[in-house]
Amino acid sequence: MDPLKNWAGNLAYSTGDVRYPESLDEIVDIVRSSRKIKSLGSQHSFSAIADSAHRQISMKKINSVIELDEQRNTITVGAGIRYGDFCEFLDARGYALHNLASLPHISVAGACATATHGSGRKNGSLSTAIRAVEIVKANGDVVTIDALDPSFPAVTVALGALGVISKVTLEVLPNFQMTQVVYRNMPVDELMENFEAVMSGGYSVSLFTDWQDGKVSEVWIKEANEQDNTTAPSEYYGAILAEKNLHPIEDHSPENCTEQMGKLGTWYERLPHFKMGFTPSSGEELQSEYFVAFEHGAEAMAAIEKMREAIFPHLYISEVRSIAADNYWMSPFYEKDCVAIHFTWKPHWPEVQKLLPGIESALAPFDVLPHWGKLNSIEPSILQSRIKRLADFKELMSDYDPEGKFMNKYLKQKLF
Ligand SMILES: Cc1cc2nc3c(=O)[nH]c(=O)nc-3n(C[C@H](O)[C@H](O)[C@H](O)COP(=O)(O)OP(=O)(O)OC[C@H]3O[C@@H](n4cnc5c(N)ncnc54)[C@H](O)[C@@H]3O)c2cc1C
């Protein structure tokens, strides 16, 4: 079989040997009988984190809702289910998740493995909803790890390095309704002076910018609400309320975006920027994303703005979000609230590849960390020096996987 490609098509995986188990027994058999193997979610990572030169185990068919536990307020799902496939189920029964990424198309285990996040000063990454995972270790043993287990802070953002996650139990909240409004053209000076207030201006706030003309082109504010938001002020820190739905990339059609204009809708139709049945983002693109401690967010943006002339020809759009701290060892948000500075690049890899080191040097004073699922070129020794719990994670890797069955080139390069 020809190797699969990732969603963006920038990466053809290095093996055509892909297994598609349909049950826990099949996962165990495949893991036991493989010398080396790598879990595959919905293939949305831009980096080679899910690649294998040997064999992949796609979790596409491990995709059912297993149990909604209304006593414990949890839902247990098959690891390969996509968020968009069970949000409606949850909502219909009165429940919600605390947050979603910009798109609902990604698998639960794949998203959590890379600390995928949405936005919100009080919202942790999607992994922070995890209450337990069932994981198949290298020797085929199946263990369930919950919050009381010492390895919980490692399995919650595990980079696919500890085993094949077969089930995930997530915390659910009472469902809620939301509205979304968009403001246009916030002057950067206003943002810099009021960074904390702007980023705290809603349940989830995203800034979109192409770094041009001293302005942030769009500010998306998602609020928990009980009715249409008809009273949003016409101006927000110098930005003007939009009069129609917008795509984050201004000249793209908003057809694939979630409803804006203050119209009330359920949580899963407002938290992501993109609708389930539509292509998210641009499609033909590359992505990079960097995280700095929240208190350095404005300064970090100013450092990137200085590079705008070099960046602009290759950029569709940048997005700036905030993520609350967690205590997961491999999470970029380990013990610190963060600001995320994201780049949706045009598919100009040779040029983008040349730009990344400059961006990373500009953000180095803030001990920048990258998104595990996106493109970066941070020198591994520097990256490693910034991950406080790396030694603990590696120790657990050798316990769960002594022979390196789940190791791939990406993990070897980045972590060793
Ligand atoms: C258009 C687009 C928009 C995006 N928006 C956001 C965003 O808003 N926020 C954000 O943070 N990221 C975003 N991303 C990045 C994306 O969320 C991450 O790359 C995520 O990891 C993709 O999940 P996946 O299911 O496709 O996993 P894959 O890319 O298939 O795999 C990612 C990792 O998960 C591991 N893995 C997968 N399944 C399992 C399993 N069952 N057991 C153990 N390990 C497993 C793999 O081995 C690999 O290490 C976006 C990506 C795209 C393409």
Image: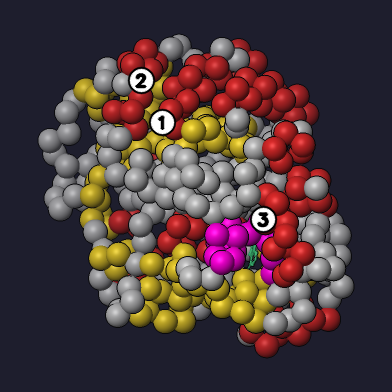
Is residue 156 within the magenta segment?
Answer: yes
Q: CA distance from mark 1 to mark 2?
A: 10 Å
Q: CA distance from mark 3 to mark 1?
A: 35 Å
Disc 3 target residue: 392
Q: Which residues are magenta?
A: 150-163
Asked whether residue 66 is in view, the answer is: yes
Disc 2 target residue: 191
Say few, some or many: other residues with alpha carbon within 10 Å of mark 2 (under 14 / 14 to 19 / 20 or more): many
Nearest the viewer among 135 and 221 is 135
Identity of the residue furthest to the bottom in this view: 25
Among the two numbered marks 3 and 1 on one chain, the one whose residue lies closer to the N terminus: 1
Q: CA distance from mark 3 to mark 2?
A: 39 Å
Say few, some or many: other residues with alpha carbon within 10 Å of mark 1 (under 14 / 14 to 19 / 20 or more): many
The answer to whether residue 289 is left or right of residue 350 is left
> Quarter of the image holding residue 143?
bottom right
The answer to whether residue 54 is left or right of residue 374 is right
Query: Which residue sits at x=17%, y=28%?
Result: 233
Q: Secondary structure at mark 1?
A: strand
Q: Secondary structure at mark 3?
A: helix
Q: Amino acid at mark 3?
A: Asp
In the image, the residue with mark 2 has its CB under 8 Å from the nearest atom of ligand 1: no
Decide: is 185 above or below 406: above
Q: Are marks 3 and 1 in contact (CB under 8 Å)?
A: no
Q: Nearer the viewer, mark 3 or mark 2?
A: 3
Q: Position of residue 253 (x, y in %)?
A: 44, 38
Among the two numbered marks 3 and 2 on one chain, the one whose residue lies closer to the N terminus: 2
Q: Are marks 1 and 2 in contact (CB under 8 Å)?
A: yes
Q: Position of residue 163 (x, y in %)?
A: 69, 69
